[in-house]
């Protein structure tokens, strides 16, 4: 399987990248971002591309992929709806539209968030914009589109958020998150489990297009190696 990852330097993207590099059935992992990840691995290729609204100049490097894990995103805190829409909707649809044309047999997995408003009419700005993005993605001619809606996420294996205050929060609360995740595995996810779940739906699909935290955890369990489940 050949995989594209957008947002591989973000917290979720780092976790997904790690799981893709570890997976035996993934032969190529190509990241797309404004900066390289700084990692080195025989499977890893990095495409540094600064214009997230136009991929015409790099289309030849975006063909022949089986799955795309789109983890690019920002916090809406302090952003206007117009600015948040540009990053969340415009950037996502620009990439997805190009990829659907270049790779019609691709599975596209988008990281959205718990509480996303599919009606697009709610009072919460970020939820409306995420809902609009989800709805637009479902109309594109991919083999399949899956929308991941995680809630609380625990970073593992050295994964860090690039947003300072978020990383400081995770550092302080890490012991509590570990305990809470052991007690509520279907509510609190880890970056590892999200990456494992993405790979599983790319391999085998899922019953529903929208995966809430419980569905993501169950997909991760299905994707575990048999020896790990014994």
Image: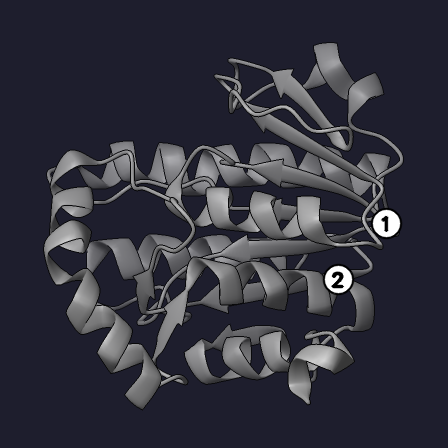
Give coordinates of residue 159: x percent, y percent.
39, 45
Label ID, residue 109: none
Mark 1 lies on a secondary structure that is: loop
Give coordinates of residue 116: x percent, y percent.
35, 67
Residue drawn at x 60%, y 18% is 54
Above or below for 190 versus 161: below
Above or below for 169 versus 122: above
Q: Choose between 67 and 105: the one closer to the eye.
A: 67
Q: Which quadrant of the figure has residue 61?
A: top right
* Residue under pointer 1: 1
* Residue under pointer 2: 202
Number of numbered discs visible in the structure rendering: 2
Q: Quadrant of the C terminus?
A: bottom right
Residue drawn at x 72%, y 10% is 57
- Judge left or right: residue 224 versus residue 163: right
Residue drawn at x 67%, y 78% is 228
Can residue 77 be seen here? The reply is no
- Mark 2 touches mark 1? (CB < 8 Å): yes
Q: CA distance from mark 2 to mark 1?
A: 9 Å
- Judge left or right: residue 142 versus residue 89: right
């Amino acid at each position: 399987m050949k995989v594209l990852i957008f947002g591989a330097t973000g917290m979720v993207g780092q976790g997904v990248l790690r799981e893709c590099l570890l997976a035996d059935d993934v032969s190529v992992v190509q990241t797309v971002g404004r900066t390289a990840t700084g990692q080195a691995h025989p499977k890893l290729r990095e495409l540094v591309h600064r214009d997230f609204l136009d991929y015409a100049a790099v289309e030849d490097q975006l063909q022949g992929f089986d799955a795309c894990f789109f983890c690019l995103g920002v916090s809406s805190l302090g952003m206007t709806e117009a600015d948040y829409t540009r990053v969340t909707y415009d950037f996502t649809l620009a990439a997805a539209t190009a990829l659907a044309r270049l790779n019609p047999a691709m599975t596209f997995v988008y990281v959205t968030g718990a509480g996303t408003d599919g009606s697009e009419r709610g009072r919460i700005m970020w939820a409306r914009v995420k809902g609009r993005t989800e709805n637009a993605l479902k109309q594109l001619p991919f083999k399949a589109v899956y929308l991941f809606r995680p809630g609380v996420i625990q970073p593992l294996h050295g994964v860090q958020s690039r947003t300072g205050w978020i990383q400081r929060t995770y550092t302080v609360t890490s012991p509590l998150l570990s305990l809470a995740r052991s007690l509520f595995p279907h509510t609190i996810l880890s970056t590892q489990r999200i990456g494992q779940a993405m790979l599983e739906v790319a391999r085998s699909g899922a019953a529903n297009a929208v995966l809430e935290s419980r569905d993501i955890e169950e997909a991760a369990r299905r994707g575990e190696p048999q020896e790990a489940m014994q």
